[in-house]
Structures are given as C-alpha cells and as structure tokens.
Amino acid sequence: MSLLLLSVVISYDIACQWKLNLTKRMNGLPEHLQMPAAVALAAFISGIPKFHCPAHKEKCVIPHSLNLMPGIGRTDGEGIEHNWAEINRVANSTKEMGASYRHDVLDDHFGHHNWRKTLTTEKIAKCCQGMRHHQSFLRDFNSAIDDAHQGEWTAMIEAWECDKSSPNPYVHSKISLSEAQVCANLMDNEKIAISNGHQLPHEMTPSSFINMGLVLEDAQRRIKSDLTRSLGANGHTELHQRQVMLQRQIAHFRVIQRVYMVGIENWIEEQDMNLSDDIEDELLWLPSTLPPSDREVICTNNVAHIEAELHKGQCCDSLDKLHRQLHTRSHFVKHHNLDLRGQKANTHASSFLARFNSKINAAAEKYRVTRSALLELVGISELDKEFQYLEARDIVAPVDMVSGGKGIRRHRGFGLLWEFRMMKVMRNGPSLVQWWNEEVLLLKEEMRRTRQFLAWRAQQWQSVTNLSHQDMQIVAGAIAYAHRQAAVQHALLARFTFLWGTGADADITAAADELTECFVEDEVNFDDEEG
C-alpha cells in the first residue's frame, strides 16, 4: 500500500540528538521499511516536549520548539508525562494492593484518562477562551510599544517565516562579553604587544591594575553593606579584619597607581575636598573619577580605555545576575504561595526573601555605579545605545509585567531589564494567536474523526454474526454483546453529534472564523480596534 507522507512530527526528550543519525539508522532497516533519505529529512520534524525544553540550551531549544512549528497548535508533546502525573496520585493506594487488583485499578485509570481525551467539548471551549485572551493580550502589548519597534519585529518574523535562512527572530543575536571575557581579551592583547617589543613600566599589566581597582571597589561596597546589618561580636571582628586587609591592598594599589597615573598624588593634593577616614569610603581615583582634561594628562598606557571595557563587562554581568535573581525570586514566591504553610515555614521564607532582595538591590546598585563610571568615560550618546539607566520600576520579574496581560496597562513602556524579553513576547504575540487558532482547528478535526471512528466501530460490532462454537448459548450471548456494543457506539455518536454538531459547534466555528479573519487581515494592528 502506497502512502503519501507530508510531514511527521516526532516529539522526543532528546530529539536534537536522535535526529543526527536518522538517515544512517534508516538505511539499516529492512528494505520494505526504508524510505529515501531526502523524503525522511523533509517529512520528519523533530521537536522537544515543552516540559523538557528548559533542560536544553537555547541554541538547541529554538530549532526544536513546538511553539515555533506551524500546524502544531498547543500540542505540548508530553502525552506520557500527562499519564504519569495522573497515575502518581493513585500510587499511595495501589502500593498496598495485590498485583492483580493493582493492574485492574491502573487499567481503569488509564482507560478513564483515554476516555476523557475523547470528550473534547471542554477542551475546545478552553481553546476558544485562550484565543480571545491572547488576542486581547496582543492588542494591549501593541499599545504599549512604539510603531518603529513593532514594524521592525514584524518584518523580521515575516522574513524568517518565508525563508528559514534569514536571521531567526527568536534567537538573541547580540553577544555581550562578561567582565572575565573582557579581561582575558585585554590580557591577550597585552601579551601580543609585549611579544612585539612593547615595554611596560611595571610588572603588573595595565589591565591587571584597573581590574585590581575594580575588585577593591567591590570590596568597599560589600563592607558598606555589612556595616548596615546588625552584627554580633564575631561579625564585628571579622569585619574589622576585612577592613585592615582592604587597607593594605589599597596601599599596594597606590604604589602601582603612581606608575600608570603619573602625577595623581599631586592632583589629589590640589583638590579641595573633605576625604573620609573610613577605608570603605576612600576614593581610589580610577580614570573615570577624573575630569576629561586631567584624565588625558595623567592616565598612561591606555588605562582609561581599559577601564571602560571592563565596566561594559561589569554592566553585562550585573544585568545577567539581575535576570537570574528575579526569575529565582518569582519561582520561590510561587512555591511559597502554593506549598508553604505554618508560621515556621513562612518565617524562614520571609528571611530568605529579605536576603534575596538585598542581593537584588546590590546587583542593581552595582549596575548603576558602573554605568555612571562608564558614562564619564564614553559619553551619553554611545552609552544609551547599549546600557540605559536602570530605574526602580525596571527591577521586576517578567511575570509581574505580563501576567494575564494586566501588567501592560500598569507599565505603558517596558524597562531596560526585560526589553529583550518583551521583544520576544512581541515576536511571539501573533504566533500565540495563530497557535490557539490551529489548536481549535485541530480539535474540530479530532471531533470529526471521533464521530467517524464511532460509526466505523458500530459497524464492526454489527458485523460480528458468523461465530462458530459448539455451545449455541455462548454464540447467542456473544452476538447479543456485540449488538449491545454497537448500540453503545451509536448512542455515543448521536450524543456527540448533538453536542458538537449543533449550537456548540456553531459557536466554536464562529469564534474560530472571527479570530482567523482578524489574524489574516492584520496580525498586529489591534490598536485601531481599541480606539
């Protein structure tokens, strides 16, 4: 029998690895099971189930995401996990049963699970509700961003959907270097310069000198933060030891500073300012703290440029740290609201959140201080292209901004932290509407196939008439049972036809057609409708 194969979606936890040797394994199959390699590569679409996607790297998730595949709808690919999630709830009772009875109970639960999958009225009603919700969400989101970004992102999506060789709009193409990577690059450049005969005035390289100053600034910030806490006797002793060690390190830093920042001591003496006696408040006088005219005279060996590059890496590190911490906090709060009960658990949770919030505030403050130093070195025009000012309203988790679409009305413009995240939301917005539309269409097709299957199944039971057995009573009983099963299938067919083929189906069709028309005519211009 010939088969026309258009496409087959294969959902597998490690589909990204499974597909690599697909053609090789295909050639190892018996000849009657083989298919041309070109057909297999074109027809087989590999996807990673949605629950398992977070365990993969981004470069692996994007090409195999079920959310980005046309025709998939809202399929999550976790059919087996759904079964396990339901059966786990009966484990406490079945583990006390005998083997035979346990198998019967599990069979009943599996059968009930499969039976509920046949009754799709509730599911399709939820899908229609989801379509309307995401249509409203997309409208709200479009009203919160400017037309330039909206047009740019939409053009990227359309170009990629037409030609997959175009830049993928769902991949973050911008690569930001961390402070460690910037430092390593600077040291490599210094090694090359030394090998070419360039002489350094000190055994410590310029990049190591600036990096030492930045490390000392971090130590000062940590000591300042600890001074605001209530410390015991041991805490005060440890803090004093850290202050003494910091004082020695700064003294060593001053010696090297005279080499790379010539005349810095005389310049400091000429300044009329009240300097603090506390070591954690002592100014290190890095190039960013000097006026531009004095910086050009005092700084040598390109230390000002080195500080600017390291500050860029620090800004990237601070933002990445904020992203991680805000995600972690939002997940912990969700866990706290769902699972934690009692005074003891809530007290521990409150203490943890307080410590975590202090870490978030420290990362935000470091970004602001680093950005201010970078502003002095490169100027506002170049800085705003990469690192914008971080306001307090920007420091929120993404779920706080877009949960249910309500956050968009509170935040008419999106902050720095989640600009890229919101860009992904905008790119996914029209796709989300289309996914829900596809899900409705897929469910309607499943309804049609369910009714077709019931009619076929009833016919199969009715055809059971020619039975051979010595005992005619058994034959009569089997035929009666077959007719009973056929009647059950006919009753189900009549019931489903009534539920799906009358008013309910008309409402579903109207909702799907209305949304399809909106999506086809204008994927993103819902602002005009909002008026």
Image (spheres, rainbow, N blue to C red):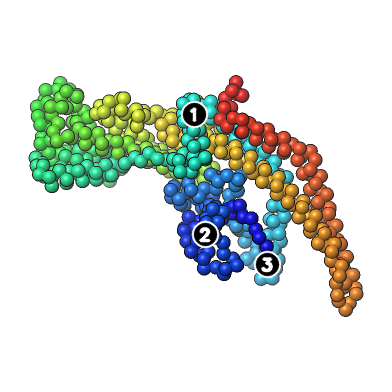
For label 1, the crowd category at 10 Å Cα-Cα, with few meaning under 14, some 14 to 19 and many 20 or more, is few
Instruction: Give the label, 2 or 1, closer to the camera.
Output: 2
Dot 2: within a 10 Å radius of its alpha carbon, few (fewer than 14), some, or many (20 or more) residues?
Answer: some
Instruction: Please identify, in this view, whether the residue under mark 3 or under mark 2 is nearer the observer.
Output: 2
Earlier along the polypeptide chain: callout 3 or callout 1? 3
- Residue 306 versus residue 171: which sits nearer the camera? 171
Q: Is residue 162 left or right of residue 384?
A: right
Q: Is residue 12 above or below residue 74?
A: below
Q: Is residue 405 left or right of residue 369?
A: right
| Numbered circle sitting on residue 103 | 3
Q: Which disc number belongs to residue 37? A: 2
Nearest to the eye among marks 3 and 1: give it.
1
Q: CA distance from mark 3 to mark 1?
A: 58 Å
Pointer 3: residues within 10 angstroms few (<14), some, or many (20+)?
few
- Work out how far the residue at label 3 is from the one at label 2, CA to CA, in angstroms: 42 Å
Q: Which residue is mark 1?
A: 151
- Looking at numbered disc 2 in the image, what kind of residue is underneath it? Ala
- Give whichever of discs 3 and 2 has the lower sequence position: 2
The reply to whether residue 92 is visible in this rendering is no
- Please identify the quadrant where the C terminus is shown: top right
Amino acid under disc 3: His
Identify the element where label 2 is drawn. helix
Q: Percent position (x, y) of residue 277?
A: 18, 31
Residue 36 position in % (x across, y down): 54, 60
